[in-house]
Amino acid sequence: MVGTLKSTGCETCRKRKKKCGEELPSCSACIKAGWKCPGYPRRWKFVDENGLLALLYRNKKYIFEDVDHPESSGDEGSAFRGILMNRASVSLGPTSKTIVEWPLASPHDQICSTLCYILDEPQNRHTFPLKSHGRFYAMIPPRLGRSTALDDAVSCLCVIYLDSLRSSQASSKECLRLYTRSLRSLRKSLDIQHIRAEAETICASVILQACELVLNDEGGRWSQLCMGTKLLIEEHGSEKFMQPFERAMLESQRAWFILQDASVGQECFLSRPEWRQVLKSSPTPIEIEEHASISLRSELCEFLVDVPGLIREASSTADQLLNGALDSVELSERRRTAILQISSLKDAFEWWYCSKITPLRSISGAVEQTEFTSTSKTSPRDDLLLAVVDCVSNSIMIKLDTLLANVESDWNKVKVDILNYQKAQARRKMMMYQSLQFVRAKSLIAAKPLEFGLRQLWLDAGFEQRNKA
């Protein structure tokens, strides 16, 4: 409500129904009559502007204060303040609106408001696609305020988003300060046994991976943070990951855990029977509502979990054959078993790719165009995830072909197979690099771990050269 002054005259003139001239210090009517003029009280005329305000803010949910404010000496948690304009309920569903309904009085309420804005704003699905990295982000708001490590990690993530809105490429001092504080809070939480076992602590470590990817050009220490998250999840135990929030975090990190173990020649803990049982369990109602790309990513990981073991066995067998080891019965049986396992996985994987991925994708022939168009009506998040799945799938098929060539003793005798092998390798590499270029153009956070995963598969030296180009 906005007030404007309204002329009313002095109180004496109003009572005696005289016209008041409102002269100072006393009106002329009171002077002529010999009365004492009491002065002029300030009166206000109220104007209803609800209609104009509703028209002004009809397309807005939030009002943000100036993000360039100086660093305050008070609570560090109030580095940014989001003010909610409308009210809605908090939902655990990843497809529903995640908006708070309480007054934003505490720091974690302000963090929650900003995170909800990032998740729900349509434009952010292109510029800051958090949901493409894991559907657990939509389940974070109700958990804020329980863990200092999670609150600090989300604070850092939100400030990174605010920095991305500016034209400057360098990270702000506030962002670096919050990232340092987040690492310190996570380290303190890991030192306390009962806090270390909480899901919020694992979530904070996953969020800090994304922060590390954004703040460092070469990925920084992302692989170390990812390895730490893997150890936390393994220590947590498979029975704890039956709940939607924990399961969503595991699904988002699953592929990177497998590729990390493949790089050192060991099987991932996810290949153990108890973890396989958890990951193959019946989906919850929340998971049924997920987009096709997330489901395809889970199906890809079902194939990917067996790759590290095949790499180790095939490499060991190939080394013995190369070193001229005696072709004993045991070695022949190992070679035959390795060929059978690789061929079986390769055939099943190629059938899955042709039936599930090929109908959803169409990439132009030129790598430089980096065009990735979906044949169905999908969201930007689906397109990004589909490109990641397509890139990893082609790299896996290249690796399986290479393993099969290493253990197949009669490979060099079949000239036609060699030509077909080379053509298939070249076609797969072209499709892999096209998908990689698409991911690079869409999301820096998604591109960096994808490049790391491709390196772990030991594709060839050409990957490093094209990556630098």
Image: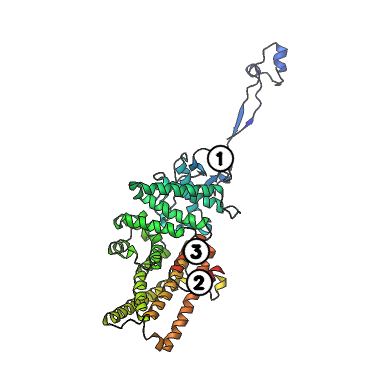
Q: Provide the residue designation for mark 3.
A: 447
| Residue type, label 2 | Phe
Q: Is residue 409 above or below residue 232?
A: below
Looking at marks 1 and 2 on the same chain, the residue that comes earlier in the sequence is marked by 1
Q: Nearer the viewer, mark 1 or mark 2?
A: 2
Front one among 237 and 319: 319
Residue 50 marker:
1
Mark 1–mark 3 Cα distance, whole angstroms, equals 47 Å
Q: Give the side of residue 312 with respect to residue 421, left or right.
A: left
Q: Provide the residue designation for mark 2.
A: 463
| Residue type, label 3 | Ala
Q: Secondary structure at mark 1?
A: helix
Point 59% across, 55% down: residue: 169
Q: Is residue 432 above or below residue 96?
A: below
Q: Give the side of residue 150 with respect to residue 21, left or right.
A: left
Quarter of the image for residue 398 reads bottom left
Point 49% across, 63% down: residue: 448
Point 54% across, 71% down: residue: 466
Mark 1–mark 2 Cα distance, whole angstroms, equals 60 Å
Question: Which x, y percent locates residue 353?
Answer: 41, 73
| Residue type, label 1 | Asn
Q: Nearer the viewer, mark 2 or mark 3?
A: 2
Q: Secondary structure at mark 3?
A: helix
Label 1–label 3 contact, CB within 8 A? no
- How many neighbours does mark 1 have within 10 angstroms: few (below 14), some (14-19), or many (20 or more)? few
Mark 2–mark 3 Cα distance, whole angstroms, equals 14 Å
Q: Give the side of residue 426 with respect to residue 243, left or right.
A: right
Question: Which x, y percent locates residue 276?
Answer: 30, 64
